[in-house]
Amino acid sequence: MCGIVGYVGDKEAAPVLIKGLKRLEYRGYDSAGIAVLGRAGLEIRKSKGALKKLEERIAGELGEGALDGSMGIGHTRWATHGEPSDINSHPHTDVSGKIAVVHNGIIENHAKLKSRLIEHGADFRSETDTEVIAHLINFYYEGDILQAVIRAMKRLEGSYALGIICGNNPDRIIAVRKESPLVVGTGKGENLIASDVPALLEYTRDVYYLDDREIAVLYRDRIEFYNEEGERRLKESHHIKWDAAAAEKSGYEHFMIKEIHEQPKALRDTLRARIKTGDTNINLEEIGFDASWAKMERVIIAACGTAWHAGVIGKYAFEKFARVHTEAEIASEYRYRNPIFNPKDIFLIISQSGETADTLAAMRLAKKGGARIIAITNVVGSTLAREADLVMYTLAGPEIAVASTKAFTTQLMCIYLISLQLGRLRETIGDTELTDHIEALKRLPEQAERILSEKENIQRFASLQFNKSKVFYMGRLFDYAASLESALKLKEISYTHSEAFAAGELKHGPIALVDDTTLVTALCTQPALFDKMGSNIKEVKARFAATAVITYEDVDYFDKTADQVFRIPRTLDSLSPILTVIPCQLYAYYCSVLRGLDPDKPRNLAKSVTVE
Ligand code: AGP
């Protein structure tokens, strides 16, 4: 959701900015722009639509004297205030045209600020909330851009990550953030900013994660950090270990299919960091999950989208293994609900990006209420990781596709490890049951590989079904939770009307929707409930729906009932979502491609939802 880049160094800035923006395309955008500060002063180019359009627009100018500076900022915009258009694209400038700003986030008091600034002579050209920032900084500008930014910050309400350049201070970029992500990269003779690490990796692996309300001033040869009072701060850099190739497609047609295929490795890495080869003990002491957590009386899980689906599975897992009362809450609902806290609550927050606005708000609310916070996230140094009491990283590597796949299955791996360990500490799970589950977890990466090796079956099925106007997923318990995620995946990238039902709810309403234009896929991995699922499948068949079942390879129970049966390797019932979701991810991917869509860039969606 909006991408920011900035460069100061010896290179021509424009190509560096465009390249960086390309690396951030996955975040979702509808227009793009850059500002370069060079011999010709501050030059801005922006364009509605794909980055390619902007690239084509400036291609002819490069080398012709235009846009020839070695410092600049760039932006991909995901419209919130004002339609996607050239004029609403960033960067935005003040009246004098000397200050340029790129912004990710929402300025909540922009209307009030705008009318005050108009009274002081500001002339607004766009409908954006961002433009007030440029005018406000100009209002406070008395020769020192840093001081003007500090004064402007005190007036801004809402969330922001900002890149700012000023024609009168042509050797520096100002970067600042509040509740929106921004990373600072430090190279040799060049420094950069970006919304996310992949945009920096070609130039450096050494990065600084800005704290809330912290300011970085980037010069070609140094970076200074300040707090919002303008006091200097010392900061430690982090070295990024993952390879730049991890953020490339590596021969796959799309990031999504690449990331689906990366799941066996991601699961293995996430597991091995906590259970050494040959060992049967879960080691979570290193991340601070010690015996003190066993005294907690309730687990509240909060997350959004796919991460919330992982949370629903978490609810079942915590209740089963640790016998602790658990709720899975949608973060955007939770934050406005005046919830009841108890200092004996474990608040488990799940987020791939670690930057989702609603998820962060729910966490801060719980923290204020006295809960102890555990974060499961994929992004080292993210806001979530920095603010939680304890962090367990999913070792999935960068997830670029908007539709989350490997983040989901590795989130589940973390949930199983924490819930099993809590069960051991609370003595609610026996040694044999614990060992059985740990052994079963170890088999999952290889089992995921086997499912992927048979992906052609799913592709063939998708080629017959991709035009279905309605696709429903149903299941019970763990299968219901996996159905939620399967339906989301399909709707996100194929734009098919797709829903998930707890199979027992079918007769309470959803069956009214079933007809001969419907495909119903039943997830059936809970043997105690096979009879019930069998009846549900017969009920939708009787209404002329096409039916598919995903079940274990040694189960023939559904062979005569369903039109199509897909088989997955046998695992323990509670761990099955890690496997059942893979054929559903593949099905969504193939449907998207067969419909001529780009699964990596679904319409209206952004990878990281950093505003409400
Ligand atoms: C997943 O396919 C979605 N794009 C979306 O639901 C996502 O899971 C959600 O926005 C939460 O993101 P987070 O994990 O980064 O917090």
Image (cartoon, rainbow, N blue to C red):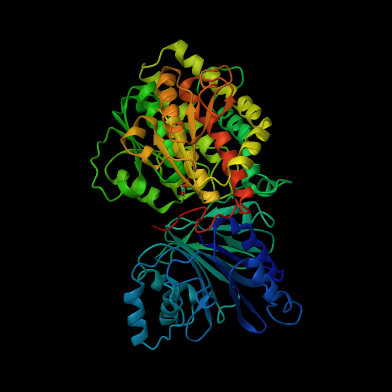
Is residue 173 something that shows in the picture?
Answer: yes
Instruction: Work out whether 275 lies above or below 91.
Output: above
Residue 399 location in percent, x, y? Answer: 58, 46
In the image, what residue occupies the spot 69% across and 60% down? 188
Instruction: Work out whether 271 lies above or below 281.
Output: below
Instruction: Work out whether 148 lies above or below 198.
Output: below
Instruction: Work out whether 315 lies above or below 10.
Output: above
Q: In this rendered view, identify the residue nearer to me: 297 or 26.
A: 26
Image-based side of 279 in relation to 373, left or right: right
Is residue 220 something that shows in the picture?
Answer: no
Q: In this rendered view, identify the residue nearer to me: 342 or 429.
A: 429
Residue 230 location in percent, x, y? Answer: 43, 67
Image-based side of 25 in relation to 505, left or right: right
Q: In this rendered view, identify the residue nearer to me: 104 or 233.
A: 104
Image-based side of 358 in relation to 468, left or right: left
Residue 106 location in percent, x, y? Answer: 41, 65
Quadrant where the C terminus is found in the figure: bottom left
Q: Residue furthest top?
A: 432
Q: In this rendered view, identify the residue nearer to me: 393 or 356.
A: 356
Residue 40 location in percent, x, y? Answer: 66, 84
Image-based side of 276 in relation to 371, left or right: right
Q: Quadrant of residue 115?
A: bottom left
Q: How many marks?
A: 0
In the image, what residue occupies the spot 71% across and 46% down? 252
